[in-house]
């Protein structure tokens, strides 16, 4: 008992000493400490009192530890000993440490600059500016609040480099620090390996920090497994609450969430599922509200924000400025030719897929051809050392253009594969390009193919198979076929299973099956499932079904990503008559194609129950064709009821064509009642096509009376296309009276288009007088329908009528109708009113009306407001409104067309650029095509080139086609080369590249001579 009392006293004394020492270091008073910790002064005084009789509470210790930045786990352990609390045994706290012990810079928050006045040697001079919360922070805060309440959450911030993503995450987790939460940043030995090794140990109340989440989710070997493990952590209640925070650049987010092609692999299926509804976009710039908040903090004494706002107050790129981006850019643009060459070689390496750590020897050799002949003659022997030293000098924000890095040692068992981003052993010094310059390089150099020295250096110095694989693809996409060939063999020599498979396919195509099989075997031995499948295919083709089955099973066991192996096994079992085995394998593969093929196979064998079961399983996983197949099998067997039952299931699943087909078959069999019943069922689920089909069949059979009866019934239900068909058929037979009668029936049902179509048919037949009469009848019917709807108070009809009155110059009536529509909350009516006021010279009222409509999101109003700004000489304000209007690209597209047609090409291009700024380059292509159709090919080239600058590589393809049409083959070749340089070749370009330069292009764009 005496020993226990002594142990408690020692623990209490040590607890008090640690707290008192930390208070002295913090230079806080006890009153200040109490305020920051949210405790009473007496509570703090007693906790720090030497010789206290009782231990402070756990809540008090945790709060003091947070403010004094002490390890709360150790202090709480001392407190438990001092209190004699033995009820909670020590357990594994899991990875990570208390949030209060983390430094934001260790979590990759960009430092912004030195702390004013701090000059103590060894002191951390980095500080963070005041934080400006934006829209995405509210979503983050909600997730943190939910986590604190016991619900596991995951949020991934998506934004370009240096936009404040990591800082947002850091600020968001601060409320959890006072609640004893831990934070874990998987990093060592590599991000992906650390995550896989530690995720299973994560304890509740832990923040998992996945900054630059592509290093985890995009890892070629472990990304999908990590995604699955994180998903399990989030969805298993006993593991929570946890909070997963991550960041991604948009290009990675787009890559991971894009749906795969139906015929290609799906390498990110689990990542896509994990990210669904868990991403938030972080804007590149501060909006006006954020800038005002930043200005307030600057006025209150935040020197860093005050300094950056002198540069970023117009473009809003505050976070980039704080992170040192402008200085990085300035240093790049003003570097020596040698330093700039090294930077551009590094930019090209990163954008073409080389990993983060770039060997010095590679960069040095790669840079040679980036230097001009004149500058090359001026290089000294130590040019590379001097250039690397210059690039390593830090800029504002403690960043360097290129910094030497020392990756952590890979503490892995012997023989384990190296991580994808690990430098090769003995590679010498390695360097890392600044993130901002990496992204800048992706933008400014996307049209350029690296020079010969780059490819030679890669072939000579790079040894990691993933790097060589990526560069092989990049060379092939740019039609640098000779370098692609050599890099592929180099990758194969380095152990790339993907390269081995590609080289094996080349051997197989060339007829060297023995050599191909050897390479497939080498890749298969390395565990590549694709190689196993290809080797199994060769065995199957050779008749060795037993050997093929073994390889297919091996591929399935190691994770064949597309279930090709299970498909093939199911096919082999099917052919052998083992339908149960085929079913089992198809179910394992979750492959609807196999289940769908098994269904009709069982159906034709007479095993209807099994067939139906397979068909329903396939339909449940999305294969509607299986249901259709059974429906047709039942029909062929004369089982109309069974056929209809499965046709209805197919229609309910989204494919009404089976019902339509059965309706047609009933009609041809003379069962009109059955045909109509099926047609109506199809119409109820998917529109009037089936009804139209039956109308068509009856009309073609000469039963015009029955066809019209069904068409009228359909029109009563709102489907007038059957009447339209019959009227056209009557018109084609020159039975004009009958045709017009049917057109009037359609017009009475609300569709006046048939009258206009008949007018056009009369005009084409040469009867212009009758055509004009019908045009007037159609217009009157249209106007009558609109007027009746307007009289009934339909806001849309009121707007249409107001537009018509405005077009005829009846401004007073137009304004009356528009105000009536505006009173019914139609925002487009406000636009009409604004246009009327503007025409009347009342610009102040026009702007007010435009703004009222714009505040509701009306794009036309934003465009109108932009035009007024432009007319007033406020070009900057106009551009901002045009960019805002780009949220609805169709409106900008239509407006740009109108400007182009009116001859105002400058305004048309400005609108098209606004759409392109928002990511929609289609309008630029539209303008170019309009000019090309008008015969103005010289003017057409400009919007094509602008679109190409925005990254729309189809523009280069269209330019090449335009030049080829005019007989200018040399110009066509020039654009084909430009397209090849981007690595994004379209159909025409790819075809011409293969035809014109079958041996490829050299890095400088000249044709490669024949090579073996």
Image (spheres, rainbow, N blue to C red):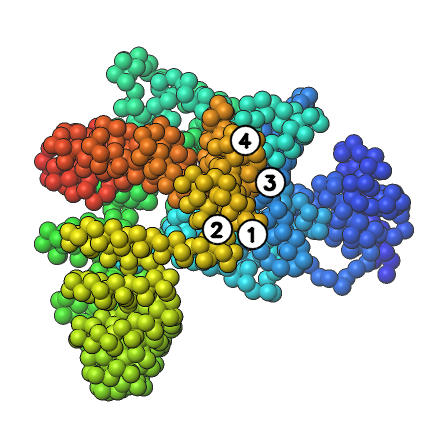
Residue in view at x 30 percent, y 39 percent:
926
Q: Which mark is residue 195?
A: none
Q: Which mark is residue 824?
A: 1
Please identify, in this view, whether the residue under mark 1 or under mark 3 is nearer the observer: 1
Residue in view at x 28 percent, y 48 percent:
495
Work out how far the residue at label 2 is from the one at label 1, CA to CA, in angstroms.
10 Å
Q: Which mark is residue 134?
A: 3
Q: Nearer the viewer, residue 419 or 741?
A: 741
Q: Are the two marked residues, 3 and 4, in contact with CB atoms closer than 8 angstroms?
A: no
**What residue is pinned by disc 2?**
798
**In the shown orientation, is residue 200 left or right of residue 559?**
right
Task: Tell me which corner region of the image, top left, top right, bottom left or bottom right, holds residue 614.
Answer: bottom left
Task: Kindly state the secondary structure of the residue where label 3 is placed.
Answer: loop
Please identify, in this view, whether the residue under mark 2 or under mark 1 is nearer the observer: 2
Work out how far the residue at label 3 is from the one at label 4, CA to CA, in angstroms.
37 Å
Estimate the x, y position of residue 993 in percent, counting from the top left.
16, 39
Q: Does 586 appear above or below 163?
A: below
Estimate the x, y position of residue 263 in percent, counting from the top left.
27, 58
Q: Nearer the viewer, residue 251 or 935?
A: 935
Q: Earlier in the sequence, mark 2 or mark 1?
A: 2
Q: Earlier in the sequence, mark 3 or mark 4?
A: 3
Quarter of the C terminus within the rendering: top left
Q: Does 41 appear above or below 336?
A: below
**What residue is pinned by disc 4?**
842
Q: Are the two marked residues, 2 and 1, in contact with CB atoms closer than 8 angstroms?
A: yes
Q: Are the two marked residues, 2 and 4, in contact with CB atoms closer than 8 angstroms?
A: no
Q: Nearer the viewer, residue 642 or 19?
A: 642
Work out how far the residue at label 2 is from the one at label 4, CA to CA, in angstroms.
23 Å
């Amino acid at each position: 008992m005496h020993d226990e009392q002594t142990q408690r006293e020692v623990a209490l004394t040590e607890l008090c000493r640690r707290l008192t020492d930390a208070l002295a270091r913090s230079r806080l008073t006890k009153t200040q400490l109490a305020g920051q910790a949210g405790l009473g002064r007496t509570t703090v005084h007693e906790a720090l009192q030497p010789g206290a009789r009782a231990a402070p509470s756990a809540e008090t210790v945790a709060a003091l530890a947070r403010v004094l930045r002490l390890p709360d786990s150790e202090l709480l352990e001392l407190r438990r000993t001092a209190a004699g609390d033995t009820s909670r045994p020590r357990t594994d706290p899991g990875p990570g440490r208390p949030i209060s012990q983390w430094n934001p810079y260790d979590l990759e928050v960009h430092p912004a600059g030195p702390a004013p006045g701090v000059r103590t040697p060894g002191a951390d001079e980095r500080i963070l500016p005041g934080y400006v919360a934006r829209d995405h922070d509210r979503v983050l805060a909600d997730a943190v609040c939910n986590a604190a309440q016991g619900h596991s959450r995951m949020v991934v911030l998506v934004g370009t480099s240096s936009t404040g993503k990591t800082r947002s995450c850091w600020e968001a987790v601060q409320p959890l620090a006072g609640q004893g939460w831990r934070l874990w940043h998987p990093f060592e030995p590599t991000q992906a390996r650390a995550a896989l090794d530690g995720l299973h140990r994560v304890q509740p109340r832990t923040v998992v920090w996945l900054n630059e989440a592509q290093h985890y989710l995009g890892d070629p070997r472990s990304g999908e497994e990590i995604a699955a493990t994180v998903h399990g952590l989030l969805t298993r209640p006993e593991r929570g609450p946890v909070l997963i925070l991550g960041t991604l650049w948009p290009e990675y987010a787009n890559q991971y969430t894009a749906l795969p092609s139906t015929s290609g692999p799906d390498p990110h299926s689990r990542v896509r599922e994990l990210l669904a509804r868990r991403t938030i976009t972080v804007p590149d710039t501060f909006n006006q509200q954020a800038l005002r908040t930043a200005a307030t903090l600057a006025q209150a004494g935040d020197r860093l924000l005050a300094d950056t706002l002198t540069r970023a107050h117009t473009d809003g790129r505050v976070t980039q400025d704080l992170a040192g981006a402008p200085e990085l850019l300035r240093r790049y643009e003003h570097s020596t030719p040698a330093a700039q060459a090294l930077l551009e070689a590094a930019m090209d390496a990163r954008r073409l897929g080389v990993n983060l750590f770039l060997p010095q020897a590679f960069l040095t050799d790669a840079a040679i051809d980036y230097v001009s002949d004149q500058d090359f003659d001026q290089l000294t022997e130590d040019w590379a050392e001097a250039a690397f030293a210059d690039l390593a000098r830090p800029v504002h924000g403690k960043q360097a253009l290129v910094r030497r890095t020392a990756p952590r040692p890979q503490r892995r068992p012997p023989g384990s594969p190296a991580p994808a981003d690990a430098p090769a052993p003995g590679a010498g010094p390695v360097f890392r390009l600044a993130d901002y310059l990496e992204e800048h390089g992706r933008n400014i150099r996307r049209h350029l193919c690296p020079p010969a020295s780059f490819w030679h250096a890669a072939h000579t110095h790079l040894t990691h198979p993933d790097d060589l694989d990526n560069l092989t693809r990049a060379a092939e996409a740019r039609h640098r076929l000779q370098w692609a060939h050599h890099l592929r063999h180099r990758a194969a020599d380095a152990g790339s299973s993907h390269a081995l498979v590609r080289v094996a396919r080349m051997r197989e195509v060339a007829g060297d099956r023995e050599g191909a099989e050897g390479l497939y075997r080498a890749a298969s031995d390395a565990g590549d499932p694709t190689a196993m499948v290809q080797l199994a295919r060769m065995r199957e083709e050779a008749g060795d079904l037993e050997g093929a089955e073994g390889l297919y099973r091996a591929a399935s066991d190691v994770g064949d990503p597309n279930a090709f192996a299970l498909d093939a096994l199911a096919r082999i079992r099917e052919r052998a008559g083992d339908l149960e085995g085929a079913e089992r394998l198809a179910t394992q593969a979750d492959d609807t194609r196999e289940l769908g093929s098994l269904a009709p196979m069982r159906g034709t064998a007479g095993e209807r129950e099994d067939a139906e079961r397979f068909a329903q399983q396939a339909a449940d996983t999305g294969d509607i064709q299986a249901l259709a197949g059974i429906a047709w099998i039942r029909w062929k067997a004369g089982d109309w009821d069974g056929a209809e039952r499965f046709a209805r299931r197919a229609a309910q699943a989204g494919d009404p064509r089976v019902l339509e087909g059965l309706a047609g078959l009933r009609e041809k069999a003379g069962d009109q009642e059955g045909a109509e019943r099926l047609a109506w069922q199809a119409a109820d689920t998917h529109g009037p096509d089936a009804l139209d089909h039956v109308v068509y069949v009856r009309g073609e059979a000469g039963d015009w009376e029955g066809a019209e009866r069904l068409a009228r019934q359909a029109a009563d239900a709102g489907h007038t296309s059957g009447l339209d068909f019959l009227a056209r058929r009557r018109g084609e037979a020159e039975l004009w009276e009958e045709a017009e009668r049917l057109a009037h029936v359609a017009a009475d049902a609300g569709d006046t288009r048939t009258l206009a179509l008949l007018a056009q048919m009369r005009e084409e037949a040469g009867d212009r007088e009758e055509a004009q009469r019908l045009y007037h009848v159609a217009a009157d019917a249209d106007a009558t329908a609109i007027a009746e709807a307007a009289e009934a108070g339909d806001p849309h009809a009121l707007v249409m009528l107001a537009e018509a009155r405005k077009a005829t110059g009846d401004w007073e009536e137009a304004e009356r109708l528009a105000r009536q529509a505006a009173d019914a909350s139609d925002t487009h009516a406000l636009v009409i009113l604004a246009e009327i006021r503007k025409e009347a010279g009342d610009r102040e009222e026009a702007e007010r009306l435009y703004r009222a409509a714009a505040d509701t999101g009306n794009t036309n109003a934003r465009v109108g407001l932009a035009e007024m700004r432009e007319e007033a000489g406020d070009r900057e304000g106009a551009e901002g409104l045009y960019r805002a209007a780009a949220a609805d690209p169709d409106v900008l597209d239509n407006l740009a067309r109108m400007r182009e047609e009116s001859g105002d090409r400058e305004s048309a291009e400005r609108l098209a650029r606004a759409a392109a700024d928002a990511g929609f380059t289609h309008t630029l292509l539209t303008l170019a095509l309009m000019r090309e159709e008008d015969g103005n090919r010289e003017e057409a080239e400009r919007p094509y080139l602008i679109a190409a600058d925005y990254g729309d590589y189809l523009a280069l393809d269209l330019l090449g086609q335009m030049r080829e049409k005019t007989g200018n083959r040399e110009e066509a070749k020039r654009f084909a080369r430009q397209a090849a340089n981007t690595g994004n070749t379209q159909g025409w370009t790819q075809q011409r590249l293969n035809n014109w330069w079958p041996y490829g292009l050299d890095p400088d764009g000249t044709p490669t001579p024949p090579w073996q």
